[in-house]
Image (cartoon, rainbow, N blue to C red):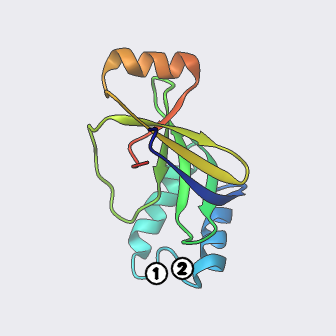
Amino acid sequence: MINYKIIETTQAADFNAALELHHQVTGEHFYEGYENVQSKDETFHARGDHSTYSVCNETGDIFYIYTCPDSMKILHKLSIHSCISNSGFNEAMVYPDCISIVERNWGNVPANRKIFARDDTTVTSLAA
């Protein structure tokens, strides 16, 4: 059996549009009480290596694709707190109206990263 998760989303034009969609869904500002983090994140997301912002229609969670220096694409969920993970990868497919995460448990090793970049496969450490 293949383990997978589908998240119904709405795509946003950019980081600020994603924050606005989050506010529309939740009624809350994402950075409320964490304004010091907001300015850092705005700078981070303005660099141009982030794309395809999507907001969960149910929870307001914000997802985005980060393109690594080695050209590998990783789907992340925006969080106030950041962390580094060396866990394996699952496959992520981002569509205009949903995100599909398929459990793969691919190892986070240089050989796999090269294959993901070459094949333009988007991966994530988010659970399926």
- At a point 67% along the width and 55% down the height, the residue shown is 14
Three-letter code for the amino acid on which mark 1 is drawn: Glu
Three-letter code for the amino acid on which mark 2 is drawn: His
* Vertical placement of residue 111 versus 100, above or below: above
Label 1 to label 2: alpha-carbon separation: 5 Å
Secondary structure, mark 1, is loop
Q: Which residue is mark 1?
A: 32
- For the residue pair 24 and 100, the one nearer the viewer reads as 100
- Counting the numbered discs, the total is 2
Q: Are marks 1 and 2 in contact (CB under 8 Å)?
A: yes
Q: Residue furthest front?
A: 1
* Vertical placement of residue 72 versus 75, above or below: above
> How busy is the neighbourhood of tag 1: few (under 14 within 10 Å), some, or many (20 plus)?
few
Secondary structure, mark 2, is loop
- At a point 65% along the width and 53% down the height, the residue shown is 98
The answer to whether one can see residue 119 in this image is: yes
Residue 74: image location, x then y, percent: 48, 38
* Vertical placement of residue 110 versus 33, above or below: above
The answer to whether one can see residue 49 in this image is: no
- At a point 36% along the width and 14% down the height, the residue shown is 111
Q: In which image quadrant can residue 8 be found?
A: bottom right
Instruction: Say whether residue 14 is left or right of residue 112.
Output: right
Residue 24: image location, x then y, percent: 66, 78
